[in-house]
Structures are given as C-alpha cells and as structure tokens.
Image (cartoon, helix red, strand yellow):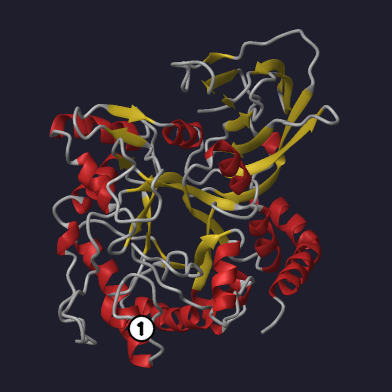
Amino acid sequence: MRHPTRTALRRRTAALAAGCALLTALVTTQLGASPASAAAPTGVRQWVTDAHTTGAQLAAPGAVTTTTAAADTTVHVDPALGFQKITGYGASITDSSAAVLYRLDKKHRDALMRDLFDPHSGNGFGMLRQPIGASDFATSDYSFDDIPAGTTDYALKHFTIAHDKPQILPLLRQAKALNPRLRIVASPWSPPAWMKTGGSMIDGKLIDDPRIYDAYARYLVKFVQAYAAAGVPVDYLTVQNEPQALLRTDYPGTDLPVAQEAKVIERLGPALKAAGLRIKILGFDHNWAEHPFDVQSHVDAGEDPELDYPFDLLNSPAAKWISGTAYHCYYGDPSAQTALKASFPGKDIFETECSGGGVTRTIGAMNNWARSMIFWNLALDENHGPHTGGCTGCDGTVNIDSTTGAVTYTANYYTLAHFSRFVRPGATRIAVSVAATEGDPAPLQATAFRNPDGSTALVVYNPSGTAAHTTTITAPGVQLTTTVAPGATATYTWGRR
C-alpha cells in the first residue's frame, strides 16, 4: 500500500504549482465583456444579518451607512478578473423534509415554499440535491428496487419511484413552478440491497460483478427517466454519496473505491447517451479531505484510503463521462477544490452538501471554484429530525415545530439568502481582495459576483465575535467606508438590476 499522506501532499503541491499559469489564463478568458463597457454604478445598497442583534436578519435594504472614521480594512473588487459561472444555491427536499413540510396545511406550506423558492418574493433557491432512495434523513430505509432478501432483479422489473409520489415529487414540481430555473443534482446513499456485498443498504460495498455494474447504471437511468416522466427533470447525477465513509451502522451508505466508481460511470455515461438523456455526471461527492476516522477504517481493513480519490477518478478512463467533481464541506479545506481545478481546468466544481458551515464555508467554496452551495435538509423539526441515523444536530433551512407548526427560519436560511437573492444563475465570480491590519486575528472574508445584467453583488462576513471592522470598499465607480459589525454578514449590490 502506498504511503497515503506523502502521496496526497505531493499530488496537491504539484497540482497547485503546475496549474498557476493555466488558471491565470482561464480566469481572464471566462468573464466575457470588458468591465469598461458596463455603465457606472449609480448607488450601493446593503442587506445585513447581524448574529448579535435579535431580529436583524437580512435587514431592510437601503443606502449604505457610511462613516468618516479611519478604515482598518480595505475590500477591493476587480471585475476585470472572472472565474467560474454560478449555477445556484439551495438545499435538499429529503424524505424527512417532505414529511415535515406536509405537517403544514396547504395554505401555510404554499406560503413557505414561496419564501424558499420564489426568486422575486423569497430566497429564490435555484438548486436542490435529491437523494435517490433513502438517506440518513428518511422515515425508513428504501430504494427504488426493493425485493426479498436473497433474490436478484437484474432486469429491474420491480423498479418503482412510488415512495416519492405522495410528497417528494409534488414538492419538487412546486419548487420548479416557483423557480423555473431550478436545477437538480441527484445522489444515491446506497444501491438497492441486493446489489451489495452484505445484502443491506447499510454499509457494505457494491458487488464486484459486471452484471451488478450494468444493473446499477440502468437503475440510475430508470430513476432519471421516471423523475422526468413525473415532471421533475434531473440535471446532474452522482453515483454514490460519500464513497469513502465506512462503518455506517444506522443509515444507508456504501464504501465505493475509485475503481468501482469508475466502472459504474463507464457504463452510466453510455447508457444515459443511448437513452437520449443530457445529464451531467459529477464524480466523488465527498469531503475536501478524507476524515481521519475514515482513513483509519480503511487502514484497519487493509485497504488503501485513496486520499487522491477525485484526482484518481479524473485520471481514469471514466473521466470522459465526468463533467465535474462534487464536494462536501465537513472536513478539510476548500483550497482542495482549487488544487483539483488546477489539474483538470476543464472540469467543474460543485459544492453538493454542507450543514453547519455557515458563511465562512460558503465564501471559501465560492472562492475556490464552486458553482453551487447546497445545504443539507430544506426543512426539519425541532428535534433535528426525523432521521434514521447520522447527524443528530443538523438544522434545516427552516425548522417546523411538530406540535404547533411554528416555522423558524434558521441561520442556514439567512446564509443562503445573502447569496441566492442577489447572485443570479449564470453570474460570474469576480476577483476580490481583503487588505487587513497586520496581525488581525479575524479578518473580513469576502467574495463577489457580476450578474448577467451587469450588476455586482459583494458578500462580506466579519468572523470576529467582538470587534467591528471599519471597511473601505473599492471597485470601478465605487468607493465608500462603512462598518461591519461583529458576526455580521453584509451583501452589497450596485449597478444594473
């Protein structure tokens, strides 16, 4: 077995070094029209969420409150340097989310869905990640081809999406009607149990058999076709959620090594094409770095931890069918995305799952090439459920009390709002730099975007719990000094809208 830490470090260092020139060329050509051709901004508006002030969530917009005090930080926005296009922001209508939302009567549920998805009066969520079968946030374990133990169904005669028809699919259709530009990425937590080594959706591996790889690829194609027939087109697919996680004991999961994921994708790509489906496949679907627990679990099992999983996958023959790589935010550093982008500049980066990461991880993901940020559950109850296992402290973007039906808008809702309300699909991330006082223990974090209509959105976060920052914001046609309170997130917009 190769030395995983040394190999991973060598690969990442080489990727960053080799990719610098290529990335410079890439970012200067993706922006499009020169900023000199855009009309000068006529005013700057701000929306602020203050973590330390009750009721100050996404406070009413208005002209920026400026100050004449000396600035300790400068935030400079440079629209001449463009990076990735943005696809969208959102969450996941898990089985648990659907169950919680259906506890509301239709009137209140419809109003909440407008708050979440309407791009004019609500957050305008534009991307969802949908489990293919059960996840840890489900009311039961299920796949779309469940058959008696000890039997097989290579012809997929028992395939059905009946489980999703009463609640999940109606909510997805409603979300799509509210936001026609909604995009969906679908991910399985486990293949059907009969395809697994342990005969269970919980833990185990995919059986290493060409018939199984073929059946699993066709299973995913049938899912896409069935969802499309139900009025919910899928835009992106991954073939396994968190393929490096072992030893799950209470919810669906599969240990899927690089070689097996490649074998599935080598069958899935041609099968999608033969079916006339223009679905993009995303690889990996796991953390920025492998968690030490998972590394040790592989070592204990006598297996290679495969710390270079996304690199190895994109170096495999399956790469021709892979549009990009999906990442999660739970361990590691988002700079891993830039290292991968440097090695494979033609492949996209998506952030497909994050919970509890807040503004810091969202800004970090955006500043490292992510085209999306998808938080986990759209809605949960006051007990962070219902769920079959896994995360016991996750919040939805909203929490709905199981007794009173009261809706609480969580920090996740407001974090996403600072992006989804102001960064339009097709926006380009543009360069932003933060110059802070030397030795500042909690400097401002920032990311910026230029929308297709020429407007600019700048998101700034102050991670300090105690210190305000007096900040000068500069950009072509913009120079002002304002104050960002401790723990506050502020979105500034200017230009055409």
> As rendered, which of 7 and 39 lies closer to the eye?
7
Name the spot of residue 414 as percent of width and height, x first: 45, 30
Left or right? Give the position of 19 relative to 273.
Answer: right
Q: Residue furthest front?
A: 300
> As rendered, which of 216 and 306 lies closer to the eye?
306
**Residue type indicated by callout 1:** Thr
Name the spot of residue 394 as percent of width and height, x first: 41, 44
Q: Is residue 465 above or below residue 390?
A: above
Question: Which residue is at a point 79% across and 17% down the rendered structure image?
Answer: 71
Specify whether residue 274 is in view. no
Which element carries disc 1, helix, strand or loop? Answer: loop
Left or right? Give the position of 459 relative to 267.
Answer: right
Name the spot of residue 465 as percent of width and height, x first: 63, 24
> As rendered, which of 83 and 391 lies closer to the eye?
391
Q: Which residue is mark 1?
A: 197
Name the spot of residue 238 as percent of width and height, x first: 43, 67
> As rendered, which of 458 and 258 lies closer to the eye?
258
Q: Is residue 79 above or below residue 195?
A: above
Quadrant for the N terminus in the image: bottom right
Q: Residue furthest bottom?
A: 210
Q: Residue furthest right?
A: 438
Left or right? Give the position of 7 relative to 258.
Answer: right
Residue density around tag 1, few if under 14, some if 14–19, many if 20 or more, within 10 Å: some
Question: Which residue is at a point 76% across and 7% down the rendered structure image?
Answer: 68
Left or right? Give the position of 476 relative to 241.
Answer: right
Question: Which residue is at a point 63% across and 37% down the rendered structure image?
Answer: 448
Q: Is residue 20 above or below residue 171?
A: below
